[in-house]
Image (cartoon, rainbow, N blue to C red):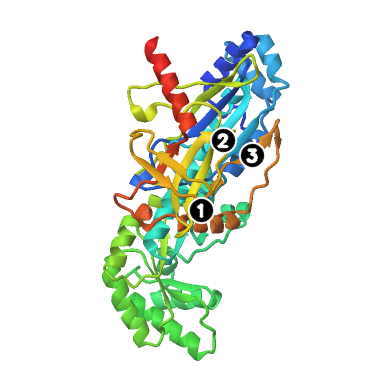
């Protein structure tokens, strides 16, 4: 985790292809690769982009140490002239990307790499590894937070994450997606995000009785006193003992600034409603009732529908692993190669599966908003030299079914590019916001979505359209390929 140079965090075939390009130096053309995904995770209507800051760090540190070269030499598949070339290797290209926290949709480039093909090829694996993971967890978190309808969500998944890195960067992504805090102390230190937690059942069990355990904890942490009440019997023992401790604190003049109980087992709807009545009857109407125990967006949504008196949720395994959808599915495909005249020649990948046919060329993304509502109407992928006037009518059409068209009248929509220039000729020209700033931006981004797109089941899919020029190029390439 401490090693910043992740140059060998790549698939072997990236390096063998690099050597092939090196041996044919006239084949080291400038190229464009797009990283994108084909379908929204978790059956949702959108995804959240995350991981860009780590991509930036990776590119900045991209170089081959002597020990890296020695290891590659030991594989006995790389020639000395290629290994010598690697000694001075660095990234010299340009990178464009969708900023972290931005809502995004299938088939549009999350990251666009413009570089000599050897450089662009090498960075494929690491970029996908980083962006796929964090975007997945940020998206899952956004769904969980949406289900909670404004209640606080705490990320509690470190012990169940698939390794330390997944725990650390998963916690970072969870904060971007909307969590109010994480139990992961190292993530708190690294990313300057709130850390939160209570105590375990072992704390209760280590004392002679439950009341003494609660009392001791309250004496130590009076301003953050959330007591775990289900170690023995939630309603007969846990909640009454918590109320006893809260009463003693109030009588002693100790301010009850943040206090309450946590439920970690049993029927959370039933127990929370019973506990709420008990706390209210004792005069603790502002006591927090938090819950954990294998929660996800669907269970939280169901508990809310049943009137559960829970206002704070600790979500662990199902969030940090995105258990029901553990892979984001991002891919990295060649989109263009620079020709002899210095202009990019569009390239396309064919497939018998329509969704796997790529969009060719040097592209950018415009987001189209309905002015009246401020909501996203569609995304428009177009060529980099295309511009649109908001005062003029805009024709949008479905590239899969081009007869389906929508005309947006001039003055009724707002349009903005959503990709940022990150690296220029190998130098980073972008400053990443802090995680909590990205979190706030992400919250506002989600507010631009229609509720129909945010719903958990069978959401409305936002249209991702192609400009007429890009669509024509794609059809021309398809026709040319079919004639071969």
Q: Looking at the image, is mark 2 or mark 3 nearer the viewer?
A: 2
For the N terminus, the quadrant is top right
Viewer-side residue, 360 vs 27: 360
Return the residue at label 1: 411
Q: State the residue at coordinates (54%, 89%).
A: 253
Q: Looking at the image, is mark 2 or mark 1 nearer the viewer?
A: 1
Residue 187 sits above or below residue 19 on the image: below
- Which label is found at residue 421? 3
- Residue 145 in view here: yes
Q: State the residue at coordinates (38%, 51%).
A: 318
Chain-order first, disc 2 or disc 3: 2
Residue 201 sits above or below residue 65 on the image: below
- Residue 331 in view here: no
Q: Quadrant of residue 94?
A: top right
| Label 3 to label 1: alpha-carbon separation | 28 Å
Return the residue at label 2: 386
């Amino acid at each position: 985790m401490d090693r910043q140079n992740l140059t060998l965090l790549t698939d072997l075939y990236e390096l063998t292809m690099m050597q092939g390009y090196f041996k044919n130096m006239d084949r080291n053309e400038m190229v464009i690769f797009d990283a994108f995904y084909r379908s929204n995770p978790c059956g949702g209507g959108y995804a959240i982009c995350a991981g860009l800051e780590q991509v930036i760090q990776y590119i900045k540190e991209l170089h081959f140490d002597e020990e890296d070269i020695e290891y590659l030499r030991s594989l006995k598949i790389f020639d000395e002239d290629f290994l010598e070339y690697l000694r001075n290797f660095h990234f010299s290209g340009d990178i464009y990307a969708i900023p972290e926290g931005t809502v995004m949709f299938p088939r549009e480039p999350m990251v666009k790499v413009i570089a000599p093909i050897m450089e662009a090829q090498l960075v494929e694996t690491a970029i996908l590894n980083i962006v796929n993971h964090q975007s997945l967890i940020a998206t899952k978190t956004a769904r969980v937070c949406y289900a909670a309808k404004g209640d606080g969500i705490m990320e509690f998944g470190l012990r169940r994450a698939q390794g330390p890195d997944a725990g650390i960067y998963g916690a970072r992504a969870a904060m971007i997606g909307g969590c109010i805090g994480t139990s992961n102390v190292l993530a708190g230190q690294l990313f300057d995000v709130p850390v939160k937690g209570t105590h375990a059942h072992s704390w209760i069990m280590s004392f002679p009785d439950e009341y003494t355990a609660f009392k001791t904890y309250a004496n130590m942490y009076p301003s953050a006193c959330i007591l775990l009440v289900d170690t023995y019997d939630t309603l007969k023992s846990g909640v009454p003992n918590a109320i006893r401790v809260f009463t003693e604190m109030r009588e002693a003049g100790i301010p009850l600034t943040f206090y309450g109980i946590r439920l970690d087992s049993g029927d959370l709807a039933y127990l929370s409603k019973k506990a709420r009545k008990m706390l209210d009857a004792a005069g603790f109407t502002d006591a927090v009732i938090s819950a954990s125990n294998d929660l996800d967006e669907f269970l939280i949504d169901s508990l809310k529908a049943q009137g559960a008196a829970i206002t704070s949720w600790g979500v662990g395994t199902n969030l940090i692993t995105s258990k029901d959808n553990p892979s984001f599915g991002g891919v990295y495909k060649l989109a263009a190669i620079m020709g002899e005249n210095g202009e990019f020649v569009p390239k396309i990948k064919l497939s018998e599966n329509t969704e796997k046919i790529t969009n060719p060329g040097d592209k950018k993304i415009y987001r189209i908003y309905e002015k009246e509502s401020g909501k996203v109407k569609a995304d428009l992928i177009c060529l980099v030299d295309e511009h649109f006037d908001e005062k003029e009518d805009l024709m949008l059409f479905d590239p899969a079914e081009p007869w389906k068209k929508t005309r947006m009248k001039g003055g009724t929509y707002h349009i903005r590019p959503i990709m940022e220039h990150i690296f220029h000729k190998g130098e980073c020209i972008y400053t990443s916001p802090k995680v909590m700033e990205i979190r706030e931006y992400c919250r506002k981004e989600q507010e631009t979505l229609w509720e129909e797109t945010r719903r958990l089941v069978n959401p409305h899919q936002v249209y991702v359209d192609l400009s007429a020029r890009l669509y024509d190029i794609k059809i021309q390439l398809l026709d040319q390929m079919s004639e071969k």
